[in-house]
C-alpha cells in the first residue's frame, strides 16, 4: 500500500469522507457495547431530512405541520371561529337556491364549499382573471365587502338569461373585456345575492348590503389594507351542465360591530346569563337586611381640636330637634325625614327620598 505522502489531495479527502460516513452509519444503528463512536457527529440521511421538513417519500408535503413546515405555516392567518357566521351562510345558501331559480328560470343548485380566514392582499393576488369584482357596502356597519364572480359563472349567467339552450356548455371567449350587456346582467345577479345576504343576517342583526361598483381589475377593488384579515366564503353555483364559483370576502373590520353576536353558539345565546338565576337573585335581594344610619349633622374640625377631646367633652351640632335629617345606607343618601319618639324608642319618620347627586360632565 502506498503511504499517506504518496496519496493525492483528492484521494485523501475521499478517504476522510468515507471514514466519516462509516462512523455516522455506526451511530445511526447504535453501539450495543457502548464502546466507540460516542463522540462522532451523526449524519442525517435523506429520509430523515425529508421527515424533518414535512415531506413524504415522493417529495410532496404530507399536510402535517411538522418540523420547518410548522414554522412556515405559523405565518398564516389563524383567527377565532365565528360559529354563528356558519349558520348565516347556511341560511344564505338556501335562500340563494330559491332566488336564483326565480332569477334564471332554471334549475339552480347552490352549495357552500368552504369558509376560511385569509389575508386581504394574499387573496387579491390569487384571484384568477378574468373575473368581475363587485364592491358592496354594509350600511349599518359602515364598511365594505367584496364579491368575486369567476369567468365560468359570468358566461353561464349570460347564456341562461339570453336564452341559451339547455344541455350545451356556455361559450367562453377569453382575452377580451366584458361587454356592457354582460356587466349589466352580472350586476342584476349581484343585486339578487346581496338582497339574500341582507335577509340572511336579519335574524342576527338587521343590515343592508348596498351595491357600490363593479370592477374587473383587482387593484381597483381594494377595500382594506393588504395585511388585514378577512373571512372568505366560497360558493358553487350549478345550473345543470353550466355554472361557476362565487366568492364573498368580508373583512373582519366589517364584522366587528356584530362580533359578539357571531361568537354565539346558537341564536339568542346570552353569554352566561341565566334568567332563572336572575329572577331568584332579585327576589332574594328584596329580603336582604340593610343597615341605615341617621345623620343628624356633619361638622368639620381641625385635627388638633379632635386630639384634645377627653371623656366628657361635648360636640355642638347645628341642628334643631324638628329639622330634617338624612338616612344613609353606607355612603349613599337614601331618604330625608324628621326625628321623633315612638314607644320609648327614638324614631325617624321618612318624608321624601334624598335628591340624587348630579354627575359632573
Image: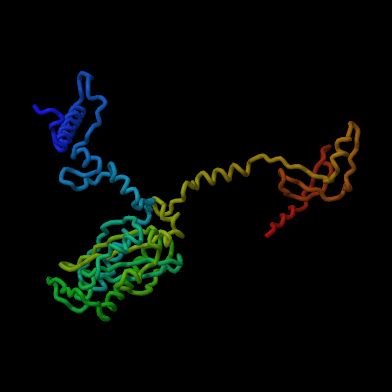
In the image, residue 228 above or below residue 6: below
The picture places residue 245, in percent across and down from the top left corner, at 24, 65
Quadrant (top left, top right, bottom left, bottom right) of the C terminus: bottom right
The picture places residue 95, in percent across and down from the top left corner, at 30, 65
Q: Residue visible at 38% across and 55% down?
A: 84
Q: Residue visible at 31% across and 48% down?
A: 72
How is the rendered protein coloured?
A: rainbow
Task: Report the side of 287 relative to 314 (left or right).
Answer: left
Quadrant (top left, top right, bottom left, bottom right) of the N terminus: top left
Q: Image quadrant of residue 89?
A: bottom left
| The one of 285 and 69 positioned closer to us in this rendering | 69
Viewer can see residue 291: yes
The image shows a total of numbered marks equal to 0
Q: Most extreme residue toward the bottom, as rendered?
A: 180
Task: Report the side of 313 relative to 142 (left or right).
Answer: right
| The one of 309 and 292 positioned closer to us in this rendering | 309
Q: Most extreme residue toward the top, as rendered?
A: 33
Task: Report the side of 218 relative to 138 (left or right).
Answer: left
Q: Image quadrant of residue 118?
A: bottom left
Q: Most extreme residue toward the left, as rendered?
A: 1
In the image, residue 221 above or below residue 87: below
Viewer can see residue 94: no
| The one of 267 and 243 positioned closer to us in this rendering | 243
The picture places residue 328, in percent across and down from the top left corner, at 74, 45
The picture places residue 235, in percent across and down from the top left corner, at 27, 62
| The one of 211 and 124 positioned closer to us in this rendering | 124
Q: Residue visible at 16% across and 43% down?
A: 57
Amino acid at each position: 500500500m502506498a503511504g499517506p505522502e504518496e496519496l493525492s489531495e483528492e484521494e485523501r479527502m475521499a478517504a476522510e469522507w468515507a471514514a466519516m460516513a462509516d462512523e455516522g452509519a455506526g451511530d445511526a444503528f447504535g453501539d450495543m457495547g457502548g464502546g466507540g463512536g460516542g463522540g462522532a457527529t451523526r449524519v442525517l440521511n435523506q429520509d430523515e431530512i425529508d421527515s424533518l421538513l414535512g415531506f413524504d417519500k415522493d417529495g410532496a408535503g404530507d399536510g402535517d405541520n411538522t418540523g420547518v413546515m410548522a414554522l412556515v405555516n405559523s405565518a398564516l392567518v389563524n383567527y377565532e371561529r365565528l360559529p354563528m357566521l356558519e349558520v348565516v351562510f347556511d341560511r344564505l345558501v338556501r335562500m340563494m337556491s330559491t332566488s336564483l331559480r326565480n332569477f334564471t328560470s332554471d334549475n339552480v343548485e347552490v352549495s357552500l364549499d368552504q369558509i376560511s380566514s385569509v389575508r386581504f392582499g394574499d387573496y387579491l393576488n390569487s384571484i384568477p382573471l378574468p373575473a368581475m369584482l363587485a364592491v358592496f357596502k354594509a350600511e349599518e356597519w359602515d364598511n365594505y365587502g367584496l364579491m368575486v364572480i369567476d369567468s365560468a359563472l359570468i358566461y353561464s349567467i349570460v347564456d341562461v338569461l339570453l336564452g341559451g339552450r339547455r344541455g350545451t356548455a356556455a361559450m367562453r371567449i377569453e382575452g377580451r373585456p366584458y361587454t356592457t350587456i354582460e356587466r349589466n346582467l352580472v350586476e342584476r345577479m349581484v343585486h339578487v345575492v346581496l338582497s339574500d345576504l341582507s335577509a340572511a343576517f336579519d335574524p342576527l342583526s338587521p343590515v343592508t348590503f348596498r351595491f357600490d361598483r363593479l370592477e374587473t381589475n383587482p387593484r381597483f377593488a381594494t377595500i382594506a389594507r393588504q395585511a388585514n384579515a378577512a373571512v372568505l366564503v366560497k360558493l358553487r353555483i350549478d345550473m345543470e351542465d353550466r355554472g361557476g364559483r362565487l366568492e364573498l370576502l368580508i373583512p373582519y373590520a366589517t364584522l366587528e360591530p356584530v362580533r359578539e353576536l357571531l361568537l354565539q353558539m346558537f341564536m339568542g345565546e346570552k353569554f352566561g346569563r341565566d334568567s332563572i338565576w336572575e329572577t331568584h337573585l332579585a327576589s332574594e335581594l328584596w329580603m336582604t337586611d340593610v343597615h341605615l344610619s341617621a345623620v343628624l349633622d356633619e361638622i368639620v374640625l381641625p385635627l388638633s381640636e379632635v386630639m384634645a377631646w377627653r371623656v366628657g367633652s361635648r360636640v355642638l351640632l347645628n341642628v334643631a330637634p324638628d329639622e330634617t335629617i338624612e338616612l344613609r345606607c353606607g355612603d349613599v343618601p337614601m331618604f330625608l325625614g324628621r326625628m321623633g319618639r315612638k314607644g320609648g324608642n327614638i324614631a325617624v319618620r321618612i318624608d321624601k327620598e334624598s335628591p340624587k347627586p348630579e354627575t359632573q360632565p
